[in-house]
């Protein structure tokens, strides 16, 4: 084991030394605010990567990678590759949990974020189908899998640590802070793409313009890595992780001992995770494929609507501290179910309908998504909480969001937008059932 540790050490030693040096200049009592900063920075970088790829899946890859089929089929193929990262993510968690147990969090995070950054920036150099043929499809799929494996390793436990160190009466407020990364990442990604799409000719954009957001993603990953290492490698936080039993447990042992909680936690946030893609990735594909509108305007609408999402996430923290997280999740799931019955059709109602759909969708998303992360984390036995929370997050994204753009586009293109609403309704029903079952089980314990 010692020799293995020596092999891994050079990968993170420089960054770790720098992180310790910065922390030494600003040491003091550990507080939730400091943890929150690291969490928000880390989540924003991950979601920026996520949305850069998602937007490219709609407006770039069908033309660059799948020009041999019609635009709708090309987008469907692109969404199929998009889903690969969600399939790979639990595998990445399994691999990087073993790295964490053997070499520590700093080695795990450095390797994972290095893999994520390299996979992301490599996409910026992706050749076109016209140059290399079908090989470009395989290259894109491999890089997308690399992103998914890496995302499984970026779980740092800071969100759980934040929740456990927050004041009891403000747990809802601190629980929503990590979720701010989603709208922040979307705003930056959508505005960046809107700038290039709106200011370049089609030839320049598809030749080189679309590649720049992937370079930016790599740079943001470096900043996020340092910000998170600054926290997790310090002796104070190492001791706090250990004292809170936030250490990795073997994946298969966790599933064997706490699999029922992982299952409940997977389905509890499905309403918000399904809505997540119904107001981010799917509507962009519908507008791009089935209307004559320029994607620039809709990307700007997405960015503005995401600002409403930020406000709603903040509100979710206040509401959760008054009525409780489970009650808020149940109420928002019921609201999402109602929203699914009429809202998707607004995408066919012109600019006003699209704007109403996006703003209402992001408000509902903010209220539900703001409290969806780790909603059942406290149900885990302490020795399984770290790994159990990671697995629950992976599987919730896989079942709730990974295939959402693909399924919604397939349904809506064949049966109309009402069928996409039915898909969203199924996610809301899963959430309602999972929460009721959890309440029922708690009442009998």
Image: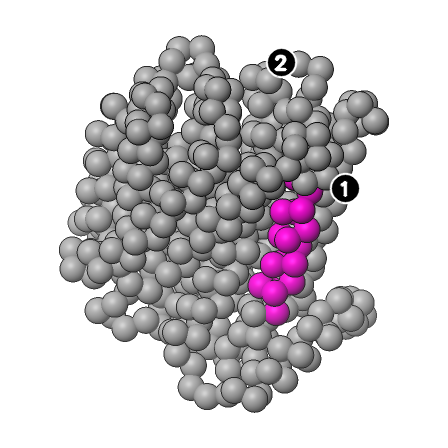
Could you say which is closer to the camera, residue 403 or residue 61? 61
Query: Farthest residue toward the top?
Result: 414
Q: Residue at x 69, y 57 (%)?
A: 114
**Residue drawn 65% across and 58% down?**
219
Residue 265: percent from left, percent from top: 37, 46
Q: Residue at x 60, y 55 (%)?
A: 153
Q: Quadrant of the N terminus?
A: bottom right
Magenta stretch, main secondary structure, is: helix
Q: Residues within 10 Å of mark 1 (few under 14, many from 20)?
A: few
Read off the magenta span. 210-226
Q: Residue 70's mark?
A: 2
- Residue 106 higher or lower than 179, as above or below: below
Residue drawn at (56%, 89%), measured in percent from left and top?
25
Secondary element type, mark 1: loop
* Residue 380 spot, x, y in % from top left: 38, 57
Task: Classify residue 234 by image quadrant.
Answer: bottom right
**Position of residue 381 measured from the top left corner of the image (x, y, whole percent):** 38, 60
Q: Residues within 10 Å of mark 2 (few under 14, many from 20)?
A: few
**Vertical comparison of 398 with 179: above or below:** above
Residue 232 visible (yes or no): yes
Tell whether 150 sits left or right of 395: right
Q: Residue 262: give x, y in percent of width and height.
A: 41, 46
Q: Which residue lies under the disc numbered 1?
A: 125
């Amino acid at each position: 084991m010692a020799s293995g540790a020596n092999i891994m050490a050079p990968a993170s030693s420089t960054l770790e030394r720098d992180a310790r040096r910065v922390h030494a200049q600003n040491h003091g009592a550990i507080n939730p605010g400091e943890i929150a900063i690291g969490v928000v920075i880390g989540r924003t970088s991950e979601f920026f990567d996520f949305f850069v790829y998602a937007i490219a899946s709609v407006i770039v890859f069908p033309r660059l990678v799948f020009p041999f089929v019609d635009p709708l089929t090309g987008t469907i193929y692109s969404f199929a590759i998009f889903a690969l990262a969600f399939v790979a993510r639990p595998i990445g968690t399994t691999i990087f949990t073993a790295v964490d147990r053997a070499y520590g969090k700093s080695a795990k995070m450095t390797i994972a974020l290095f893999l994520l950054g390299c996979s992301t920036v490599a996409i910026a150099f992706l050749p076109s189908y016209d140059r290399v043929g079908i090989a470009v499809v395989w290259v894109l799929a491999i890089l997308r899998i690399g992103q998914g494996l890496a995302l499984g390793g970026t779980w740092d436990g800071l969100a759980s640590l934040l929740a456990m160190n927050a004041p009891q009466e403000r747990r809802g407020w601190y629980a929503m802070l990590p979720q701010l990364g989603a709208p922040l990442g979307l705003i930056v990604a959508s505005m960046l793409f809107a700038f290039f799409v709106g200011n370049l000719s089609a030839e320049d954009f598809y030749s080189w313009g679309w590649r720049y957001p992937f370079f930016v993603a790599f740079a943001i990953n470096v900043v996020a890595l340092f910000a998170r290492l600054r926290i997790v490698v310090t002796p104070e936080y190492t001791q706090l992780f250990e004292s809170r039993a936030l250490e990795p447990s073997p994946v298969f042992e966790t599933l064997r001992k706490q699999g029922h909680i992982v299952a409940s936690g997977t389905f509890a946030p499905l309403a918000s995770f399904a809505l997540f893609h119904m107001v981010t990735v799917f509507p962009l594909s519908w507008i791009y494929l089935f209307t004559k509108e320029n994607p620039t305007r809709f990307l700007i609408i997405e960015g503005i609507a995401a600002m409403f999402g930020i406000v709603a996430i903040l509100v979710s923290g206040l509401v959760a501290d008054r009525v409780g997280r489970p009650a808020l999740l149940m109420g928002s799931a019921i609201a999402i179910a109602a929203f699914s019955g009429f809202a998707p059709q607004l995408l066919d109602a012109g600019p006003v309908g699209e704007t109403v759909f996006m703003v209402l969708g992001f408000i509902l998303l903010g209220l539900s998504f703001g409290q969806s992360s780790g909603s059942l984390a406290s149900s885990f036995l302490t020795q399984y909480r770290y790994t159990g929370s990671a697995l629950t997050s992976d599987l919730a994204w896989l079942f709730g969001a990974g295939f959402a753009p693909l399924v919604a586009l397939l349904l809506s293109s064949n049966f109309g937008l009402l069928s996409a609403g039915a898909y969203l309704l199924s996610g809301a029903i899963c959430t309602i059932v999972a929460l009721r079952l959890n309440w029922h089980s708690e009442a009998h314990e």
